[in-house]
Amino acid sequence: MKISAIICAYNEEKTIKDVVTAVCDYYFDEVIVVNDGSTDGTDKILHQLKDLPTFKYIAYPDNMGKGYAMATGVENATGDIIVFVDADLSDLKDEHFEQLITPVFKNEADMVLGQATETLINYKINPFKSFTGERALLKKDILPILDEMKTSKFGVETLINLYYQANEKWVKYVMLEGLNHPTKFNKFASKSRAIKEFIAEGHQIALAAFNNFNLLTKIVKNQIKNI
């Protein structure tokens, strides 16, 4: 089975080089990087990496939103398995990719969600772990919701999670030991800017849930059926 990695980036000049290099150094058949209208030095750095093996670059002049960028990556992927990787990570290792891919490859899970252990919230009790950007899944399973993904912005992970639950897909969580994922407070010098970003993302997540009430209804029906 071919495996495609997708990295969506928006203003990640501090980490994008290390993330892309680490992903390209692994055994992916292709690495698709979608630059979602970055206004910092992300584009310049990515052009410097164009000769890396398996590297494919897609750049948008304007910010289209995380969901649109992820859907674009899937549309351009040739792999059977898709692995999404955030662009703002630190200390990515080969074993992290293996933890994400292996259960899907061995048909032990339909989707694997990877939780970075080096976060502000204790990873063992993190209530937001289902929103992680590190995930592996089969391309064929996500194709039916590509159009919805394009309009979901930061609610894209919520949409995917609801879709998998509604269709009773098997989801597995793995702990990615030593992987560092920064919070908004780590990324932005201004606390008010970080809070503003949190509020905006929270609104998009809530909107994704509201717009997919049919999936929530299906989940409840499945739970009643299985009692």
Image (cartoon, helix red, strand yellow):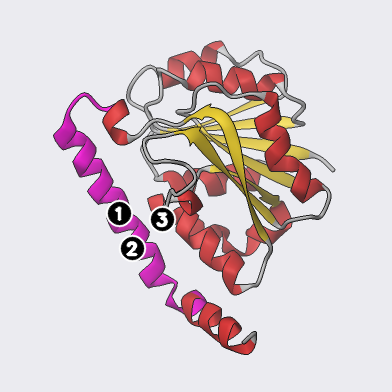
Q: Can I make out residue 79 in this image? A: no
Q: Nearer the viewer, mark 3 or mark 1?
A: 1
Label 2 SS: helix
Q: Which residue corresponds to the image point at 59% horizontal and 35% vertical from the top-left?
A: 176
Marks 1 and 2 close (CB-CB < 8 Å): yes
**Amino acid of disc 3:** Gly
Q: How far apart are marks 1 and 2 (CA)?
A: 6 Å
Q: Mark 3 points at which residue?
A: 155
Q: What percent of the width, then of the height, locates residue 126?
A: 43, 48
What secondary structure characterizes most of the magenta part?
helix
Nearer to us in this view, 108 or 160: 108
Going from the N terminus, do you reach mark 3 or mark 1 first? 3
What number is the disc on residue 206?
2
Looking at the image, residue 4 sits to the left or right of residue 198; the answer is: right
Q: Quadrant of residue 208?
A: bottom left
Marks 3 and 1 close (CB-CB < 8 Å): no
Q: Can I make out residue 15 in this image? A: yes
For disc 1, the neighbor class at 10 Å (few under 14, some 14 to 19, many from 20) is some
**Amino acid of disc 2:** Ala
Q: What percent of the width, then of the height, locates residue 10?
A: 40, 32
Bounds of the magenta span? 188-215
Q: Mark 1 points at which residue?
A: 202
Q: Which residue corresponds to the image point at 63% horizontal and 48% vertical from the top-left?
A: 75
Looking at the image, residue 180 sits to the left or right of residue 96; the answer is: left
